[in-house]
Image (cartoon, rainbow, N blue to C red):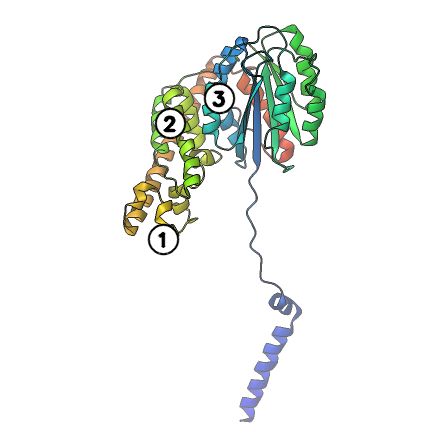
Amino acid sequence: MRTNILVAGVVLATVGAVLLHPSIRGHAAGPPPQAVAPAAAKRVEVVFVLDTTGSMGSLIHAAKEKIWSIASTLAQAQQAPEIAMGLVAYRDRGDAYVTQVVDLNRDLDSMYSRLMDFGADGGGDGPEAVNEALEAAVMRMSWSQDPGTYKVVFLVGDAPPHMDYADDVKYPQVLAAAAAQGIVVNTIQCGSMHGTVAPWRHIASLGRGRYFTVEQAGGAVAIETPFDAQIATLSAELDATRLYYGSADERAAMAAKVDATERLNHEASVAARARRGAFNVSAAGASNLVGERELVDDFASGRVDLAALPPAELPAAVAVLPPDAQRELLAATAEKREELKRQIAALAAERDAYIDARLDAEGGAGQSLDRQIYEAVREQAAPLGLDYDAGPRY
């Protein structure tokens, strides 16, 4: 008995010493460890301010061809960013319109559908409504308030601003507002109109951006490849895997996105559709591909409980099935989607290699529109933690 009491005493003393040791006591008494939230995605917001007067037809065509390449260039930051784009088309007073605005949006398909509506007309009398266009870009866009977002405007045109209108806001005042919001303004002069040089340089200087010139046709790299048609076809198949759910209003919003995509797939060039396909399979392109309230993606990632969704909120193709068949359909569609992404990514890599080889054989891209936009982005985004070192995509 005496031995048992001694053993029990030793055990209790040992346990007490352990529990009272400062390092153990502090750990036991402290709060539970907190989960570390993943770093917030970087964000890039780009607005193109585009002169759509009669002399700009070739550049507008180049914009329609190259916007997806620019998106792919922006997507290449080492930490894949969220990308939103907006547009301001401008002409002058007395033309069909002075400005038309497409607000910043991560739905690049819908933005591109609006870009497809723009054509060249009007103008021809020298200065244009540049002041109004810049004001629209800076003051009427839904810019992020996050100081860590790379916010940038590219003003693209060939004629100087009207400085003789009494009732517009002149560009120095607009650019002061841009600086206060952290928005960088670059200028791209198309052609060689002498009277445009000084104001374009001044706008870029006040906007803390770059001034550069391209030929009137746009000076973009335009190389078709043997891989374009297959990428475009697979991209359309990838689009067809989308199934949207939610309230009637939510599904109507996504139906508008689907309409924009279908228009793009019917009217855009094969090369433009290939560029879009390559962008959509990048990490930054995922949001443009699926949009919001997309059931295949949300089911595969576990963000939605299929059993908890009211039948009225399900896509028609899913709602008619019993629960087990619903899950089987979504799992099979997710698997098909991933396989299509793998095929497109592999072909896009071959496409890039083909273009790089052609450019090397022809002496490089030089001061192309693609290269100059890339250099501006690389320089301006770096202080915000966005590292671009892979060169432009074409």
Residue on which disc 3 sits: 115
- Examine the rendered structure and indicate whether residue 333 appears above or below residue 49: below
Q: Is residue 283 left or right of residue 159?
A: left
Q: Nearer the viewer, residue 78 or 156?
A: 156
Q: CA distance from mark 3 to mark 2?
A: 15 Å
Between the residue at mark 1 and the residue at mark 2, the CA separation in whole angstroms equals 31 Å
Point out residue 53 in the picture as x, y percentages from the top left corner: 55, 11
Amino acid bearing label 3: Leu
* Element assignment for label 2: helix
Identity of the amino acid at label 1?
Answer: Ala
Q: Which mark is residue 262?
A: 2
Q: Are circles 3 and 1 on residues that touch, CB within 8 Å?
A: no
- Is the Cβ of the residue at disc 3 closer than 8 Å to that at disc 2? no
Q: Residue furthest bottom?
A: 1
Query: N-terminal of the two: label 3 or label 1?
Result: 3
Q: Earlier in the sequence, mark 1 or mark 2?
A: 2
Residue 312 in sight from this viewpoint: yes
Count all numbered tags in the image, as a single digit.
3
Tag 1 secondary structure: helix
Residue 76 appears in the figure = no
Q: Residue 282 lies in what quarter of the image?
A: top left
Disc 2 crowd rating (10 Å Cα; few below 14, some 14-19, many 20+) is some
The CA distance from mark 3 to mark 1 is 40 Å
Q: In the image, which disc is placed on residue 307?
A: 1
324 vs 231: above or below: below
